[in-house]
Amino acid sequence: MTAQLLEVKDLRVAFGGKEVVHGVQFHIAPGEKLALVGESGSGKTVTALAMLGLVPNATVTGSAVFAGLEGQPPRDLISMPERDLLSVRGREIAMIFQEPMTALNPLFPVGDQIAEVLQLKEGLSKREAWDGAVKALHATGIPDPERRAMSFPHQLSGGQRQRAMIAMALAGRPRLLLADEPTTALDVTLRVQILDLLGEIQAHNGMAMLLITHDLNLVRKFADRVAVMENGYLVETGAVDEIFSNPQHAYTRKLIDSRPERDVDETPAGGGAPVMEAKDMRVTYPVHLPGIKGWFRKGQFIAVKNAAFRIEPGRTLGVVGESGSGKSTLAMAALGLIPHQGELDVVQRRWGPDAAGNKAIRRMVQVVFQDPFSSLSPRMTVEEIVGEGLLVHHPEYDVPQRRARVVQALSDVGLTEAQFPGLLNRYPHEFSGGQRQRLAIARALIVEPSVLILDEPTSALDVTIQKQVLKLLQGLQRDKGLSYLLITHDVDVIWAMAHDVLVMKDGEVVEAGTVEEVLKAPRNPYTQTLVAAAA
């Protein structure tokens, strides 16, 4: 039997006497890729951080035996003194965190941050460390690494920031890499690029990896073995092929079956009056011109170029593309929140300079944002949040009338007093992510809109909760005849929800058609790349 690089036994983590990780056991062989999967709150990240002593105010017991370097005995990370752990972190075991924008220091260029690791862990001089940082960036495929090394994190794209994080993690040439949701914040094509990069580096260096994720598609493509966690317990482990073809535990089957399912009215478009229609829509932003030209005039950045679309009653238009493609700008223009040129009509009314006229249109177009936790006021109760729109659009309602409408809107999205005693007086933090998104949908529905703009409505949710929210939206569309403008980078969500699709790249619509035409027989190379990356 091959000696294990890492062997974890009976790992337990508790906060204030309450245990959150319960006797977890797993192992990782040299050069192996193990995926630790589960929903938010399952204990995946806490398990990984606890092994390195990175969970403050926690009581950690059990063992995590890490193989010693050649000629040295194995060491138990859990019982290791902090001074000794410092030499292991970053040198023998490194970590890639989920969100590089918060993990990287915004005050220092990325090259300096990578060079610091080389100085501390490898004992290199300042000049040698800088050269090593540039080489590390070059190894991750960042173009023009000498210049990018001098860039601050905010000056890099999401993919470039993640590559810089990988370069920093690998600078000390670790034997084990802990990757915590390394692609969650990235577009679908960037996810494939980062996975390919990690795979190449892992194969070249013979490094082992612990991949922490809830993305089963990613696991299927990347990992050798899978360990499934639920509520702090390890419920199933096995080879990737075995787990996906014959899952034994009910929770594993639930995760695998959580891919979005298409359940929409397939009746062909009737050709009636559209609830929203755009022609030659264009959105621009002023930008500073370099040099002396900037003294006299400003340049122009075109965020959306001559877009055209129509949404008919009871149908969904999906807009798909990577970050920076212009899809969210299109949504903001459709909401009347940013100025645009061209024509944009909502229920045969045009957005214009008349504020009174726009107020009537705003009732017809409502929005559900990506992250319900940040879009719901933490200081307002459920009744205040959901009923706020009625104060604007139906000021004639008295308190009992408003409350009755709030209760009905909450019932429509599956939230009732029977389930949640004192529901109307609760605050957003007292609900789960999926329940908060239901509150956001109720807030939008209460004024009886014709169009809901869904801006990445499930990207912040776990796969099982995502499926529930999509099923809710599908049911509401059938019951109320709602139309949706769905903004997303997830091709699976487009397939589950949309009737028609726009594909955007660099502000332009590069392909449009029915969901069958665009996703099953894409013509544009960019669309083909998106569809292939999601397969």
Image: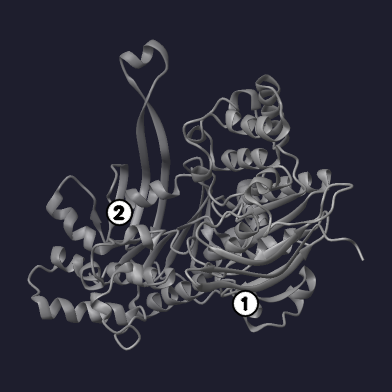
Residue 348 percent across, percent down from the top left: 25, 59
Q: Is residue 420 above or below residue 497?
A: below
Q: Quadrant of the C terminus?
A: bottom right
Residue drawn at x 70%, y 56% as measured from the top left: 77
Circle 1 Cα neighbour tier, 10 Å, few/some/many (<14 / 14–19 / ≥20): few
Q: Is residue 178 above or below residue 463?
A: above
- Name the residue at the top extreme: 292
Disc 2 target residue:
335
Of residues 478 and 214, which is closer to you in this image? 214
Residue drawn at x 47%, y 69% as measured from the top left: 16
Residue 274 percent across, percent down from the top left: 34, 63
Earlier residue among tags 1 and 2: 1
Indicate the amino acid at tag 1.
Answer: Asp
160 on left or right of 17: right
223 on left or right of 254: right
Indicate the amino acid at tag 2.
Answer: Leu
Which mark is on residue 257?
1
- Name the residue at the right extreme: 1
Q: Are marks 1 and 2 in contact (CB under 8 Å)?
A: no
Q: Nearer the viewer, mark 1 or mark 2?
A: 1
Could you say which quadrant of the image residue 20 lies in? bottom right
Element carrying mark 1: loop
Residue 162 percent across, percent down from the top left: 60, 43
Element carrying mark 2: loop
Q: Is residue 190 above or below residue 218?
A: above
Residue 454 percent across, percent down from the top left: 40, 61
Mark 1–mark 2 Cα distance, whole angstroms, equals: 35 Å
